[in-house]
Image (cartoon, helix red, strand yellow):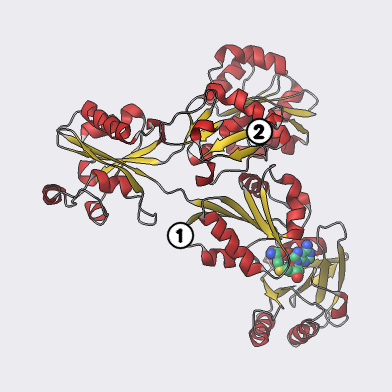
Amino acid sequence: MIGLVAATAAGRAASAALAAAWGGDARVYGGDDQSAGDALRAAFAECDAVVSFLAVGATVRVLAPLLQHKSQDAAVVCVDESRLFAVAVLGGHHGANELAGRVAEVLDCTPVITTASDASGVAALDSFGADLGFVIENPGRLASVGARVLSGEPVTVFGAERWPLPALPPNVTATLCPAEADIVICDEIVEVREGALVYRPASLVVGVGASRGVSSQEVLDTIDAALAAGGLAARSVVRLASVDAKADEAGLVEAARTRGWPVVFHAAAELAAVEVPNPSQVVAAEVGTASVAEAAARYAGPTRPLADLVVEKVKSPMATAAVARLRPRGRLAVVGLGPGARDLLAPRAVTELRRASVVVGLDQYIEQVRDLLRPGTQIRASGLGAEEERARSAVELARTGLAVALIGSGDAGVYAMASPALDHADADDVDVICVPGITAATAASNVLGAALGHDHCSISLSDLHTPWEAIERRVRAAAEGDFVVSFYNPRSRQRDWQLGKALGILVEHRPGSTPVGWVRNASRPDESRGLTTLELFDPAVVDMYTVVTVGCSQSRIVGGRFVTPRGYAWAR
Ligand code: SAH
């Protein structure tokens, strides 16, 4: 929930504009009988974020006594009386920077971001790996290590390559020795150098077995003994796991609650299938699996690979514990860049480009977004034609554990990279995130007017991968079905007859006066377009940077625009 607090008429008007734009996500605080200070305090206490239309100074004075820690406090953005700026005041990396951007979009003002790492595009260390569950062991080192990363001094990192992390700038280089590193990402308790910043990755699962009536203290002691046996950090524990017969074992549930660890219970049949070093027939007879602690530590769900056992079971009179290390999965983001214009690129696509450490794509598309990539991002650019290889290499890189963005123009799932990539990425291997982009057909339709107002389809005229007979069959079906048709890949130097042939099929089923629009380089600086009719259209005017849209029998040209009626009764 975002709290909105205003004291003046102008502030209340701006606050109402945000409330209208955000609907149920926002709540206006304050009223006639409440002072602005009280309203701000209430909003700060009850919301995840606050937009204050009071001055920065006034806001800070009211909230200063209430501040706890940036990870807990509501993020605060202040907007000035003239609506010129949205200033991220508190919790920049905990929502305020992003919120300032959202406010700026609605109020059409400038977001003011003062956190250093964002200004320079370098990944912020205090949220580094946060979405992977990383916990910072010693937050007191953040400022000094962060300053060195930003100032360009040489900084070394240990353990980053195992995780799909965003790029670190080029002055941060990998080392294989944790004792020499300035940044250590490690679930083992290792010697580190003075001043090093230590991240505990979310990597360990503790399997726990317990006899009826075990005390929570005994469970915790056994878990601690297992962690100590492996020299492992408790902060890297992601969860406890056991067999479902123990789901109501109070000592186990209480132990998990005490440390704030989630606990999961797996079916005995699932655990019985897990290979373990120390099975027990006694346990098998009792709960239906020969191992509880070791098997539950390893079992990660039906579609995930088994975790690697790192500590075999440790026993106490009434409890057992074993520890396994999860295999990190790489991250593959398939990102559509839209038709070309920067403001038609989705904000989510920008987030994914900045989340990646490797970006794979055609060189011209890389150039389109190069300025958005974080310093240190590896770039794998390739020329036209190497689609299959590009898709495969992106998946292979993600498989090694990296965060990879595979980019394509328009929507990456439309005649583009998503399907060849996902053909190679089976579910267990990598996490896949697909970000939609505005595809050429809709970009063109909007340039032309409202060409896709009723049923429509897209057909690619490229017969390099699809036999012409199949393309022709689809064109015929679209003609008979009276669909509006957007032709992708309409014409190139080698493929110069297909478009004429396709239009010849369409004109058998719709009038010669049917609108035909073409848009070349939609939304790019050299965008051009044309609008004519089926009988007058000359296919020679288009090339492979063009989409050609042919209306259905109901489409018309209205005021110089291509309009396909929606066909509602009220339109008659
Ligand atoms: N994934 C892309 C399509 C790739 S196929 C998308 O969703 O838009 C390549 C074809 O798309 C080109 O031959 C052209 O027909 C069309 N195309 C892509 N971008 C375009 C643009 N900005 N303007 C017009 N046509 C475009």
User: What residue do we see at 21% from left, 28% from top?
Assistant: 218
Question: Residue 366 location in percent, x, y?
Answer: 73, 55
Q: Is residue 71 at least partly visible in the picture?
A: yes
Above or below, comparing residue 179 to residue 323 in the picture: above
Q: Does dot 2 land on a helix, a strand or a loop?
A: loop
Q: Residue at x 88, y 60 (%)?
A: 526
User: What residue is shown with label 2?
Assistant: 154
Please report whichever mark, 2 or 1, sits nearer to the chain's N-terminal start: 2
Bin the neighbour count of mark 2 within 10 Å (Cα to Cα): few under 14, some 14-19, many 20 and up.
few
Q: Is residue 339 visible?
A: no
In the depicted view, which residue is nearer to us: 439 or 492? 492
The N terminus lies in which quarter of the figure? Answer: top right
Mark 1 residue's CB less than 8 Å from ligand 1: no
The disc label shown at residue 315, or none: none
**Amino acid of disc 1:** Ala
How many angstroms separate mark 2 from mark 1 (CA)? 38 Å
Q: Quadrant of residue 483?
A: bottom right
Total labels: the figure holds 2
Residue at the spot of label 1: 427
Give the residue type that dot 2 points to.
Pro
| Quarter of image, ligand 1 | bottom right
Residue 154 position in % (x across, y down): 66, 33
